[in-house]
Image: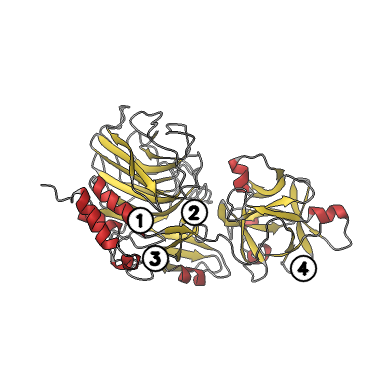
Amino acid sequence: MSSRPSFDGARALAVAFLSSASLVAAAAGPCDLYASGGTPCIAAHSTTRALYGAFTGSLYQVKRGSDNTTTNIAPLAAGGVANAGSQDQFCASTTCLITIIYDQSGRGNHLTQAPKGAFSGPESNGADNLASAIGAPVTLNGQKAYGVFVSPGTGYRNNAVKGSATGDAPEGMYAVLDGTHYNGACCFDYGNAETNNLDTGNGHMEAIYYGDSTTWGSGAGSGPWIMADLENGLFSGANPKNNAGDPSITSRFVTAVIKGGPNKWAIRGANGASGSLSTYYNGARPTVAGYNPMSKEGAIILGIGGDNSVGGQGTFYEGVMTTGYPSDATENAVQDNIVAAKYATTSLTSGSALSVGSSISLRLTTPNFDTRYLAHTAAAVNTQVVTSSSSTALKQQASWTVRAGLGNGGCFSFESKDTAGSFLRHNNFELKVNANDGSKGFKEDATFCPQMGLNGQGSSIRAWGYPTRFIRHYINAGYIASNGGVHAFDAASSFNNDASFVVGTGFA
């Protein structure tokens, strides 16, 4: 006889636990619900909240740029939301990276910086980048928390996982993601992957993929879609090319579910802030050689492909992996729990208030350079001394019209005052002024999020799509730079000063 509860039983259990938002911290978490369904979590990762009702341990670790010291962030209470306030205090006036995402299951299946694989990451040793600790702020039941904002080149991995599914053994997984942050590159994944960072063949992975790649498969519409990365293919169903039943996603928060067992697997999904799970595929494995039976290896990845392909982007808030093939009823109860957590957006900016439509100037704060302003000459961004007696042309070159963020309306874009329709943007981390071509990539590259100045003056302005990187002047040129990264313009010396600007009224 099955030990799993019926659909009604699992739903009733969830309702009993979650009938009041005030009881969420003391109630069952997603992994409690999976355990009650007979398919316990072997890994539970989240930077936003505890995934067990009694969990009080560390959710994640951050490292600050000022002295490379680390600290762990725990929930505010057992089963509760992460203590974002402690992170904010620790990271004040400097940059912070997420170094470890702890496994809450007790098995030690933590996620750390992914090493080099078939593809190299951007770090000097071929490892992947770490995520900014502040790139993905949200609220849960009104309490602030931070997700994991994965830019291309960012990735986490564990190749020595305890208890994960290998071979053709059954497993389940879910992730809560940002439905508006994605691209078509390979591969923004969370799930089961190779243990050697290489592509070892068809069927050696089983991971959640989210994005709008059409290289291997697709769903209905133009995407993005929830698909399964089974290695050498992103599958939306049994047909390797298209499943019209796998819809394009439109919600800001997405619950993505993949589960698989011997010659069966499923894709399910939902709005992560409301509603119930829908099944987008439920059936047999793909008939292409290598996928039946599967040859899963049991590592866990986040933000990358199994071979360390590092082109994908997305945002991860929470996710788990289970042993055994979860019932729909259990997953439905987990979705109820996610909805009850009340994920919601919050401000992406702080510090100096910017007014859309206003004309601004950006004055440097670095000692001995504080009479200079961020300006441009043709497409090249530089710094120039500008005064009230400067030429009209120079005043225009050092003035910017504030626009709502082209890539995200929660931040801002800066239109050139002297070249209508051209915007400040980054290209290969170098600042340029280019005409808006209307592409998704351009809009994201031209979107910036101001915050309190890292040196205590004015504002520091981070790139929305690369929140570890801030507008910075270096040898009289403009870049988006990270604090102590691999490029010369990432130099830690004078970083806080070089990345802080006084926002003033535009000269033109």
Question: Which amino acid type is marked by label 2?
Answer: Phe
138 relative to 295, above or below? below
Please tell me which of labels 2 and 3 falls first in the chain. 3
Cα–Cα gap, marks 3 and 1 = 12 Å
Three-letter code for the amino acid on which mark 3 is drawn: Val
Evaluate if marks 1 and 4 touch, with contact meaning CB atoms under 8 Å apart: no
Q: Is residue 1 above or below residue 501?
A: above
Q: Quadrant of residue 49?
A: bottom left
Left or right of 210 on screen, residue 457: right
Q: Secondary structure at mark 4?
A: loop
Badge 2: residue crowd in 10 Å (few <14, some 14–19, many ≥20) = many
**Mark 1 or 4 closer to N-term?**
1
| Residues packed near mark 3 inside 10 Å, few (<14), some (14 to 19) or many (20 plus) | many
Q: Earlier in the sequence, mark 1 or mark 2?
A: 2
Residue at screen point 58% across, 51% down: 408
Q: Which residue, as the protein is rendered here, is positioned at the far left?
A: 1
Question: As rendered, which of 232 and 403 lies closer to the eye?
Answer: 403
Which residue, given by chain and number where applicable, does mark 2 sit on?
149
Q: Which residue is mark 1?
A: 338
Q: How is the image coloured?
A: secondary structure
Q: Which residue is mark 4?
A: 368
Q: CA distance from mark 1 to mark 4?
A: 52 Å
Pair 1/2: label in front: 1
Alpha carbon distance from label 1 to label 2: 19 Å
